[in-house]
Amino acid sequence: MNVRPFVNRSIVASLISALLLIAAACGGGAPEQNVDDPLTAVAEFASIGDEAARSKALFVEAGRVIQHPRCLNCHPSDAHPRQGELLAMHEPPVVRGEDNHGESPQRCDTCHQGANVDHAGIPGHPAWHLAPLQMGWIDRSLAEICEQIKDTERNGGMDMKALLHHMEEDSLVGWAWHPGGDREPAPGTQAAFGALIRAWIETGAHCPDGEEGAHTVSAAPWNADCQSCHELLFE
Amino acid sequence: MAIEIRVNGKTHRLDVDPDTPLLWVLRDTLGLTGTKFGCGIAQCGACTVHVEGEARRACVTPVEAVAGKAVTTIEGLAEGDTLHPVQQAWLEEDVVQCGYCQTGQIMSAAALLDANPKPSDLQIKTAMAGNICRCGAYDRIAKAIRRAAGEPS
């Protein structure tokens, strides 16, 4: 015996309207695509004579990618991915799960496909998932992120070679430069970013300090509309 | 391009564009209209089906992504005349008001209990947060899930 839902056309129309309103309110509100935000080339840092200072400056430039929303949204320091340019809470609300791929029945691939789904504004990649908790970057200063990236206890056991590969060649990381839709791409190119990381490693992988090292990006608080949706649903 | 998919145990060979949403194939090609179109952008959960036992939003899943995989829709959730425990609990708790979201709710709840047979109240809320009910039947939905899990509803 099957359960067959019954349908009323006017109810359906109302439901769809309501859902579209909710989706519009909670969509993340990305601005116009930024098509020209290059990274400073490694050669430009040659004028910094002191190697440690050069290394720090290289990391600060690479930090423009690391602390970009395309990277931070999937490097949260808590159990929840973010979305959009303001690091808004993921809609619908989801949790990271034990394997960083979400928890059933809301696994990442419940919605995220092998490629972007443009009609729905849903980003996609075959390996779509969160970075592990110990690799969280939101609410951490660039100096803290730098130390964390080098620490094999907190970077998934990656040595510098593996780290460089992740930054320079990983295709999920590479999605950040080709995000599609109205999402702002990460600055420069993955190759330019990889070159910065490579040069940073070759100059001793020093971490920035002072004002530049203190640069921290925090997640947006709950969007007020979404907050009220959730209070309505669950409180 | 022909794509083979297995829906509720039956194999279908389809001549559809590979990027056609699975929901379209289920409803329009196969006539399985139990799965509903709500928002079309994976924000409401009405179109939830199972692919290899995991919940999927059929409205954003290209049919090519499920080629050769086992798809279960609400029509295939019961075992013959025996309702799935979530369906049975749905009736016993009298969950339905308008009924439009219930397919997605039941499919998500079934996937939840498959992965976590004894979810806490918070786990139920978290798991079901992607399924919207315009009638606001959340209390009864949670009760039915607790009942299906063998907990006091």
Image (cartoon, coloured by chain):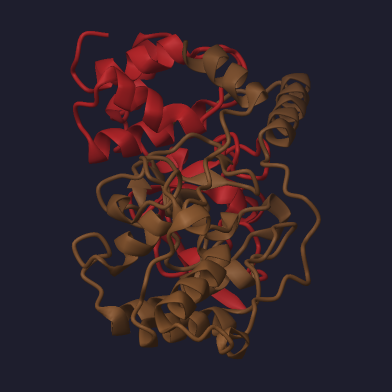
Query: Could one spot residue A167 in this view of the protein?
Result: yes
**Which quarter of the image is occupied by the N terminus of chain A?**
top left
Res B79 → quadrant: top left
Q: Is residue A97 above or below residue B123?
A: below
Q: What residue sits 29% from the left and 69% below the top?
A: A150
Q: Nearer the viewer, residue B52 or A231?
A: A231
Foreground residue among A39 and B134? A39
Q: Residue furthest front?
A: A49
Residue A38 position, x and y percent, is: 70, 76
Residue depicted at x 42% and y 66%: A127
Residue located 45% across and 72% down the image: A56
Left or right, residue A80 beside residue B78? right
Q: Is residue B22 left or right of residue B144?
A: right
Chain B visual colour: red
Q: Which chain is brown?
A: A
Q: Residue at x 67, y 70 (%)?
A: B17
How far from the left and from the top, in percent, is residue A203? Answer: 39, 85
Residue sticking out furthest to the right = A32
* Camera-nearest residue between B19 and A92: A92
Q: Is residue A187 above or below residue A22?
A: below
Residue A235: percent from left, percent from top: 47, 10
Q: In the image, residue A228 lies at what x, y percent?
A: 61, 17
Does the image show residue B78? no
Q: Is residue A200 above or below residue A109?
A: below
